[in-house]
Amino acid sequence: MPEAPPSPAGIESYGYKQELRRSLRFTDLLVYGLVFMVPIAPFGIFGSVFQGSGGMVALAYVLGMVAMMFTALSYAQMSRAFPMAGSVYTYAGRGIAAPVGFLSGWMILLDYVLVPGLLYLIAGVAMNSLVPAVPVWLWLVGFVLLNTAVNYLGVEMTSKVNKAMLIGELVVLVVFIAFGVAALASGKGRGFDFTPVYNSQTFSWSLVFGAVSIAVLSFLGFDGISTLSEENQDSTKAIGRSMIAALLLAGSLFIVQTWIASLLVPDPNTLIADGDPGGTAFYDAARVAAGGWLATVTAAATAVAWGFANSLVAQAATSRLLFAMARDRQLPAFLAKVHPRHRVPVNATLLTAGVSLVLGLYTASREDGITLLSTLVNFGALTTFLVLHVSVVVHYVFRRRSRDWWRHLIAPVIGFAILAYVVINADIAAQRLGFVWLAIGGLVLTGLLLTGRRPNLAAMASDSAPSKENP
């Protein structure tokens, strides 16, 4: 008989005090995930994925969605087992071992801590292209201050802003799709065909999976929903369901918009050969569809979505990860401080803002700033997702003696295999930098062990008790 889902109010049984405010419902979580992923995310990286996939952008996003769906299934299982903040740090630490959790949290920091800086930088560059009189650094500072103020006021304020921003992004997307379809129907572009999904002249699995390693940047964010477990007031199932729903909705939108844009690209062969150094490939396709006004609208929407909406939720997710690790004495204790009135991890929020500002200003001065941050973000996320799949098998199959073979063995193994192939085909520079970061994490963990601060999550003993029931 299936085990009843644990109450979301039960983190006290894991040795923690309920400090964050439980005010989010399934819809709030779904909106949060959609905003974090950004429904118009492909606007900003379309040219890179087009070149990397040999023009088969839609196929890259289909495979990316499938890979992330298996990851979402694993997140759903672990979020029900351990309904608390911390994401993979918590799940790997409790599902496998506390030191593994620390290293997973360390690697996911490459995603969570760096991604706000990446988003601010992309938005600053985009806004500077529209308003050259305002320098990139000033746009960047403005976005950081605005998002920090909203997050400081509490998760309810963040949720309200998320909904407004999501509506705006969807309106722009609908306008592009409508004008794009009309343009193709009238004979513009290449007309309707299936080359964005399969092109026999350029297809190879290594090529497409290499492009998937770029395309997954658009999907990163659904996992951020798991960091809000202690602010969810619905059943623990709401976390997993909202992840899966967000992935399906966002993935479908990614596939449709990139398919249309691929057919409207003015010179696809040149784009494949020379890439998209200016990051304008999608806007060029929009210009073909309806003229310069649509190119401007899509560029402005990208800047606002990445610099405000996406950065807002990224900052919130990062602060919750820092809060969870500090609460377990794996980071300085001041990061575990919760604001008495707003009930948010205030110091973690301010630190995230400071790091994002410094990173953004530094990388804005580098020609390869966006590429450098993007590769590190992707590598950090994908490697921690691999550990997530392992934690599902270890916790459920080996510890809990689960016989739900699909959810607790087969699906995690398939998800692991897909992501492993993507990581192997990822950028070499990203692999090197990622492993350097992992080595630094290993040294930090060694220091913690030598100084008597061995990772020790609260109430760990109760986590490993065997059960004959399948959660």
Image: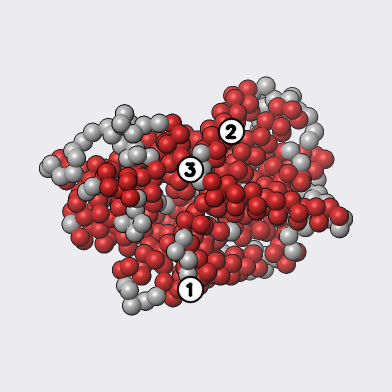
Q: Is residue 182 left or right of residue 104?
A: left
Disc 3 on helix, strand or loop? helix
Q: Is residue 392 visible?
A: yes
Q: Residue 166 location, x and y as percent? A: 39, 54
Q: Residue 305 location, x and y as percent? A: 40, 59
Counting other residues with Cα less than 10 Å from the Cα at mark 1, is it few (<14), some (14-19), or many (20 or more)? Answer: some
Q: Which residue is mark 3?
A: 213
Q: Looking at this view, is 114 or 144 the one in front?
A: 114
Which residue is rendered at x = 34% and y = 53% of the image? 276
Instruction: Give me the disc on residue 416.
Output: 2
Q: Which amino acid type is marked by label 3?
A: Ser
Q: Residue 83 location, x and y as percent? A: 66, 44
Q: Which amino acid type is marked by label 2?
A: Phe
Q: Is residue 425 left or right of residue 75?
A: left
Counting other residues with Cα less than 10 Å from the Cα at mark 2, is it few (<14), some (14-19), or many (20 or more)? Answer: many
Residue farthest toward the bottom in the current orientation of the protein: 133
Q: CA distance from mark 1 to mark 2?
A: 39 Å
Q: Which residue is mark 1?
A: 141
